[in-house]
Image (tube, rainbow, N blue to C red):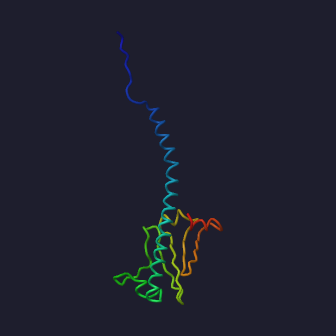
Amino acid sequence: MHMRNRQLGITLMELLIVVTIVGILVAMAVPSYRAYMVRTNRTDAKVELQNQVNRLERCFTRTNNYFNALCTQDAGGAAIYPLAVKDTYSITMANIGGGNYRLDAVPQGPQAADDTLCATFGVDNLGNLTVTGTGSGTAQESCWSR
């Protein structure tokens, strides 16, 4: 009886094909993941802006002033603003005066470089929403809704 030598394992060509396929999948997945992270960070900033608006309105109800120390300082007496949101946004407060305020969520680090369409989100005491970025018209309006 004649026995044949059989090769076990994979060939170099098979390995190169698998590596190429994995490379193509990674090339498609990484930009999609980055876009997902940009949108997620955006959402986190908008949620924190709304939390801060709610906090300021509760404080105004108690003190009849947005700029009372209870509104702008933490329990230890340190200023709340600027407030970091996961190292991707910084929430700042502009004291416009006359019982008005404006909160802005400004992108930081990689978020600033990656999210030029919907850069800085703003909200004021009247509930006016703004966005500064490269988008215009409906593109900026969709920044608040996404």
User: Which image quarter holds the N terminus?
Assistant: top left
Task: Tell me which residue sits at (43%, 30%) in the image.
Answer: 11
Q: Nearer the viewer, residue 37 or 145?
A: 145
Q: Position of residue 130 (x, y in %)?
A: 58, 74
Q: Position of residue 82 (x, y in %)?
A: 44, 77
**Position above or below: 62 against 86:** below
Q: Residue furthest right?
A: 137
Q: Residue furthest front?
A: 61
Q: Quadrant of residue 122?
A: bottom right
Q: Position of residue 48 (x, y in %)?
A: 46, 72
Q: Position of residue 6 (x, y in %)?
A: 38, 21
User: Which image quarter holds the C terminus?
Assistant: bottom right
The number of discs equals 0
- From the viewer's perspective, tell me whether residue 8 is left or right of residue 95: left
**Position above or below: 89 against 25:** below
Q: Residue furthest top?
A: 1
Q: Nearer the viewer, residue 51 or 8?
A: 51
Task: Tell me which residue sits at (56%, 78%) in the image.
Answer: 127
**Position above or below: 76 against 105:** below
**Position above or below: 81 against 137:** below
Q: Nearer the viewer, residue 134 or 144?
A: 144
Task: Tell me which residue sits at (54%, 72%) in the image.
Answer: 121
